[in-house]
Amino acid sequence: MSLSRRRLFQRLSPVEASSPAEWIAARGREAGLTEFGEQGMAAGARPIRIASNENPLGPGQHVLDAIVGKFPEAHRYPFNAKQTEGALITAIAQKNAAKNENVLLAPGSGELLVHAVRAFTSASKPLVTAWPSYETPRDIAKKMGIPVREAALDGKLRIDIAKMVEASKGAGLVFFCNPNNPTATVHGKSAAVDLVKAIRAASPETVILIDEAYHDYVTDPAYGSMIDVALATPNVFVTRTFSKAYGMAGLRAGYAIGHAPTVKSIAAYKMPYGLGTLTLGGAIVGFANDAHIASERKRNTEVRNFTVKAFADMGVTATDSQTNFLFLDIKRPAAGFRDACRAQGVLVGRDFPPYEKTHVRVSLGTMDEMKKAVEVFKKVLGSTTTTSSKDKQQ
Ligand SMILES: Cc1ncc(COP(=O)(O)O)c(C=O)c1O
């Protein structure tokens, strides 16, 4: 029996909506997913979820339509999706002036970080990571009993390049997260190029992983992707994800791109058919639509500017965010702030030691969500100030 798209949505959706995007919007974005049972929240409450750096709008109608179009194949193993997988690899390669052998797909870029630790580190070849930074490489290395060298951040909570280079000598893998999660800061292209050059000189065997999960949200003109450098330099590769600007976090897709022999070493750990048919169908359509990503960046920048200013008006400073989240100096423990926000229906980020006593990470939702969240933040922080001293002077 053939299943029309509309009927399929009606089956999937708890409300009568004509499209998945409308359904998500009608249900208050992620609130549609589950009734939660989040600790400290009223039963059945629909929280504003700004804890996990997701795109609050999802992937866009064009991607949702493509995914729905793949449902008739959902009961088959993704042998047939092999062609789409090849086409997605080719599309990624072509957009970056690379060859297919330079690209490796995975169900999420996090999985590639794990593979890289497995492939390039050992008991005698440590992992180097900034700290705090995205935890996956460090966590997996620790589980595997691999030594980890942590390089503290600089005074502006940016990755300290000199410390990373110093720590890289004899290391198996350097994890350089640019922009960095959780601190939201970025290094410009020339600083990133210098880092690669210095590590290559100090420790030529060391592999350098540049994580660009938040690439699409950067607005700093000094920033540039390191994909071109990775393609031309042995032992260097970049990871990207469909989970952030592409709005596909729940579908799981990411890729590595870089020097072919390095990418091949990671590919040894790849699961066959790791990406599902629906994911591939959505990702290829999403990847082709640069205009959609540009408009998502614009939307995020507007929300970011609004939220940074709202916090500044409360006397709370953010690092220079180049992402879809803020790292904020609230001068009190994140745990108490988080619990108080949760009690009022706003879910913010977890603890990020060693800054958990002073800083909190807040992801950016829609403008509407952030306007509501700001009212909660004002109450929780006990601030009644609505205009900054700068505004008053004008
Ligand atoms: C910096 C960074 N890298 C990688 C990931 C993993 O992303 P995914 O596995 O969803 O592609 C995340 C997720 O939040 C991240 O923040």
Image (cartoon, helix red, strand yellow):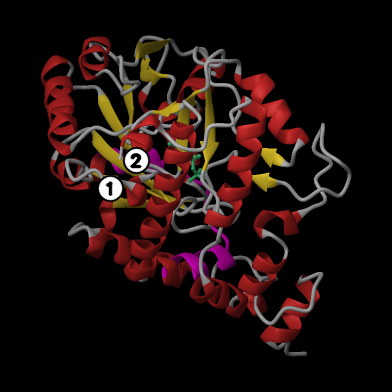
- On the image, the x and y values in percent for residue 328 come to 47, 27
Label 2 sits on residue: 322
Residue 130 sits inside the magenta stretch:
no
Residue 219: mark in rendering: 1
Secondary element at tag 2:
loop
Residue at image point 39% right, 33% down: 184
The span shown in magenta is 262-284
Residue at image point 36% right, 58% down: 298
Q: Quadrant of residue 388?
A: top left
Residue 268 sits inside the magenta stretch:
yes
Q: Nearer the viewer, residue 76 or 202?
A: 202
* Label 2, label 1: how far apart the Cα atoms are: 6 Å
Q: Which numbered disc, 2 or 1, marks the residue that appears first in the sequence?
A: 1
The quadrant of the image that shows the N terminus is bottom right
- On the image, the x and y values in percent for residue 297 come to 37, 56
Q: Identify the amino acid type marked 1.
A: Thr
Residue 305: mark in rendering: none
Q: Is residue 335 left or right of residue 181?
A: right
Q: Identify the amino acid type marked 2.
A: Gln
Residue at image point 60% right, 38% down: 51
